[in-house]
Image (tube, rainbow, N blue to C red):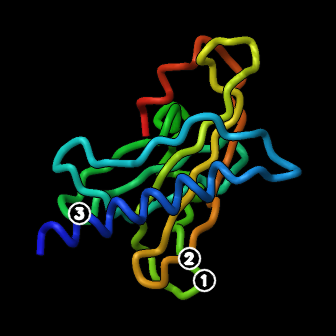
Amino acid sequence: MGGSAATAQADAYEELAEFLLRPEDDAYPVHEVRECVCRSCGGRVFEVAAMADDEGAVRRTCVACGVHGFIADSAEYWDDEDDVEVCACNCGHEEFTAAVGFSLYDDGSDDVRWLYVALRCQSCAEIGVYDDWKIGYGPSGLLLDQV
């Protein structure tokens, strides 16, 4: 059984990566995709919350162990006192696998220009971008490992 669960998780990540790498007319191209994995227990299913303002901040909470993690530079902007929206799928469920797509600058650096947080519903497998934001500083390549 453990093998089939691992295969399902790998399939979910592959679907997220394909979705994020698909060119969009009104978006920067994604050059790198990273899977969200809990640093505490290795879990890959999360409840996800986003700040309601335009700063761009997303926090994920591992369903397996309850540990919070921030995506990219979100910890700098997170404020539990502000409006926080729990992400929910159109089907109503709130547990997701997650990946982050990074658009890099064309100058050959690994500096991040824009990032996209994509979630795949554990219940119905619907995929969507739930938040995205510009990274307006450099060096910012370290954000690639903060998913």
Task: Give the left or right position of residue 113, taking residue 18 as reference.
Answer: right
Residue for point 56% across, 35% down: 32
Crowd rating for badge 3 (residues with CA inside 10 Å; few <14, some 14–19, many 20+): few
Which label sits on residue 44? none
Instruction: State whether residue 126 is above or below residue 74.
Output: below
Distance, label 2 to label 3, CA atoms, is: 19 Å
For the residue pair 115 and 137, the one nearer the viewer reads as 115
Q: Which mark is residue 6?
A: 3
Above-or-below relation of 55 to 20: above
Q: Is residue 30 left or right of residue 64?
A: right
- What residue do we see at 52% from left, 58% from top? 16
Question: Foreground residue, 12 or 115?
Answer: 12
Q: Which amino acid, by three-letter code, is at mark 2?
A: Glu
Q: Nearer the viewer, mark 3 or mark 1?
A: 3
User: Would you place residue 57 above or below residue 77 in this image?
Assistant: below
Quadrant of residue 47 within the rendered picture: bottom left
Three-letter amino acid code of the residue under disc 3: Ala
Q: Is residue 44 left or right of residue 126?
A: left
Q: Earlier in the sequence, mark 2 or mark 3?
A: 3
Q: CA distance from mark 3 to mark 1?
A: 25 Å
Q: Which mark is residue 126?
A: 2
Residue 135, how many percent across, how many down?
A: 68, 28
Nearer the observer, 95 or 79: 95
Choose the circle earlier in sequence order: 3 or 1.
3
Amino acid carrying mark 1 in the image:
Asn
User: Dividing the image into 4 quarters, which one contains the N terminus?
Assistant: bottom left
Give the residue at the far bottom of this rendering.
Answer: 91
Label 1, residues with CA under 10 Å away: few <14, some 14-19, many ≥20 = few
Residue 137 locus on image (x, y percent):
67, 17
Q: Which residue is mark 1?
A: 90
Q: Are marks 1 and 2 in contact (CB under 8 Å)?
A: yes
Element under label 1? loop
